[in-house]
Amino acid sequence: MLYVKAPAKINLTLDALYKRADRYHEVEMVMTTVDLADRIGLEPLKDDQIKIISSDNFVPHDHRNLAYQAARLLKDTYGITQGVAITIEKEIPVAAGLAGGSSDAAATLKGLNELWDLQLSIDTLAELGAQIGSDVSFCVYGGTALATGRGEKIQELPAPPQCWVVLAKPKIGVSTAEVYGGLKVEEVVHPNTQQMIQAIETGDYDLVCASLGNVLETVTFKLHPEVVMLKEQMKRFGADATLMSGSGPTVFGLVNSEARVNRIYNGLRGFCEEVYAVRILGERNILA
Ligand SMILES: C[C@@](CO)(OP(=O)(O)O)[C@H](O)COP(=O)(O)OP(=O)(O)OC[C@H]1O[C@@H](n2ccc(N)nc2=O)[C@H](O)[C@@H]1O
Ligand SMILES: Nc1ncnc2c1ncn2[C@@H]1O[C@H](COP(=O)(O)OP(=O)(O)O)[C@@H](O)[C@H]1O
């Protein structure tokens, strides 16, 4: 069995510039991976089938699974007749704004590239990933990046200044398509993406905190007011800055003191089941 790690991402910024003719939004996003990860196990099968094994009931076990789609894409593109059993040990909450499914797909692409000895470059894997979903290219590279286009054009950035990230997910799942569908691009307050990049490049933690912004927040807040409450609680418990990740509903807080992390974690655990305190995995780890 070949194992590959599939880490979650958070969006430090998420800006939408306009809606395109293909109905996707042209975006600018600063994203970074965190050390909350699924584990993907890949085992060759003699017969020509793709089998998904997972004990998580929220994860589809058929062709709708993004890891299944990654294997299908490689098989169809490169004429592979071997089958594979894909075991998904799920740690990342599903439909949470943390790109769990996209990261599983990216890890599957990387793992099968080895298992089937395809010798594809990381850039080719990222291009293939874009056919599966907008976030998959970023997940292939990991680390920290500016993502543009519909999210698939990736420019590497250095690691942000090290800090803790507290993640809290309310008991709801959010549909990315529904949230983007409710966005009125002409009314949004744009985050300052260039300032975030400058903050990361100069290692300025306070400026990172001041530059967080996500135009999807207002849409998800209207659909699910409990997300606003959670964000306010996190700030009240002492996070330096807070933001919703992706289309939500997960909210994260940045914190640069361990004592405060514990206080926030314990405080939030009182009324939110899914809380995690993790570190930023700022650097690329292509081999995962
Ligand atoms: C919002 C983000 C931010 O990182 O993350 P999540 O909340 O999903 O984690 C991503 O852009 C999500 O990427 P991903 O989940 O791969 O989305 P896709 O499957 O490509 O698209 C789902 C739907 O979202 C809308 N969509 C997505 C990306 C984009 N740039 N513009 C869009 O309008 C489209 O309606 C599309 O049909
Ligand atoms: N391997 C997978 N893990 C999680 N969700 C998956 C996976 N494959 C497909 N999905 C589907 O993708 C949708 C989005 O899930 P996910 O990637 O976890 O969230 P998000 O897009 O908010 O980051 C879910 O509705 C789920 O049914």
Image (tube, rainbow, N blue to C red):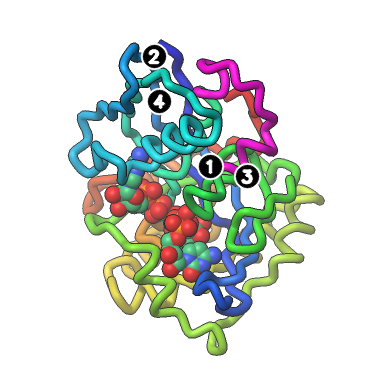
Residue 127 shows which numbered tag? Answer: 3
- The residue that appears at 59% across and 35% down in the rendered structure is 281
Q: Work out whether residue 245 can be spotted.
A: no
Q: Amino acid at mark 4?
A: Ile
Q: Amino acid at mark 1?
A: Trp
Residue 206 shows which numbered tag? Answer: none
Q: Nearer the viewer, mark 1 or mark 4?
A: 4
Would you place residue 272 above or below residue 114 in this image?
below
On whether residue 117 falls in the magenta region, the answer is yes
Identify the secondary structure beneath mark 1. Answer: strand
If the image is split into quadrants, where does the C terminus sit? top right
User: Which numbered disc flags the more N-terminal residue, 4 or 3?
Assistant: 4
The picture places residue 253, in percent across and down from the top left corner, at: 48, 54
Dot 2 and dot 1 residues touching (CB under 8 Å): no
Question: How many angstroms separate mark 4 from mark 2 (CA)?
Answer: 13 Å
Q: Amino acid at mark 3?
A: Glu
Question: How many angstroms separate mark 1 from mark 3 (CA)?
Answer: 31 Å
Would you place residue 95 above or below residue 23 in this image?
above
If the image is split into quadrants, where does the N terminus sit? top left
**Residue at the disc numbered 4:** 40
**Residue at the disc numbered 1:** 164
The magenta stretch spans which residues? 112-128
Would you place residue 85 above or below residue 270 in this image?
above
Mark 3, residues whose alpha carbon is within 10 Å: few (<14), some, or many (≥20)?
A: some
The picture places residue 277, in percent across and down from the top left corner, at: 43, 40
**Residue at the disc numbered 2:** 44
User: Which numbered disc flags the more N-terminal residue, 2 or 3?
Assistant: 2
